[in-house]
Amino acid sequence: MKIVVLLKQTFDTEEKVVIENGVIKEDGAQFVINPYDEYAVEEAIRIKENGDAEVVVVSYGPARVEDALRKALAMGADRAVLIEADHPVTDEAGVAEVLAKAVEKEAPDLILAGNFSVDNGAGQVAPRVAEILGLNHVGAVTKVTLEGDDVVVERDAEGDLERIRTKLPLLLTAQQGLNDPRYPSLPGIMKAKKKPLDRLTLSDLGLGDISPRTTVTNRYNPPKKEAGEILQGDIATQVETLVKKLREEAKVI
């Protein structure tokens, strides 16, 4: 079995995001594996440990993404592929097109990815890859059981549990609760330095420049929250004051 994991490198969730003129500054920022993608990496490694499988992690982005791929290799993945672009100017549709070409070359039995990324939060890339490749897709997965070519998954369905039986090949996206990702061991880190990491370009995949279908017009920090107001007086007075403020200040009624 071959398992491909789609991986994205994102800002550290503890990192303070600095925006200047609508552009996010990366100077000095710390980057990590997108936490939901880390669940996908861990699940792929667990499947490998329970049977005969090869785990390949694939990412699209600048050279710094190698750090995230090396961590996945240190966790236990076998091989990595980086489609390298210094300044990839595209959107979720374009990223999906690039990744789908790379995945198609690998011809995997199972594709795993995070449910969404913690930076953009769109949750579009993995389902788009499945659509491009004509594969079944199950999202927000919290449990995976392989039974030959059959796959039984449990998924978070807005507070309820949904159980689905389907077949390989298949794309799954990992939700929080699927597993607890391991920390790379020192031997794993040393081995990761020698594991193969292939670098590809868009031309290697038969692609030219990927034009985005959507455009970000601006980025800005949310406005600072103002202090709340505690209404005074009896209930009738508070209700009258509240209604007046909703009508005259908030203008929502």
Image (cartoon, grey):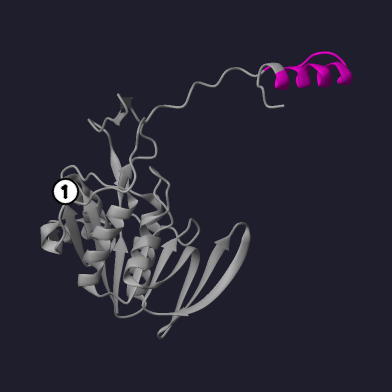
Amino acid type, mark 1:
Ala
Left or right of residue 67: residue 20: right
Left or right of residue 182: residue 190: left
Left or right of residue 71: residue 128: right
Q: Main structural element of the magenta stretch: helix, strand or loop?
A: helix
- Residue under pointer 1: 85
Based on the picture, tell me whether residue 236 belongs to the magenta stretch.
yes
Residue depicted at x 38% and y 73%: 135
Can residue 195 be seen by looking at this rendering? no
Residue depicted at x 21% and y 52%: 210
Q: Nearer the viewer, residue 135 or 109?
A: 135
Left or right of residue 123: residue 234: right
Q: Nearer the viewer, residue 14 or 180?
A: 14
User: Which of the image's four quarters has the C terminus?
Assistant: top right
Residue depicted at x 27% and y 34%: 29
Outermost residue on the top side: it is 233
> Magenta residues?
229-247
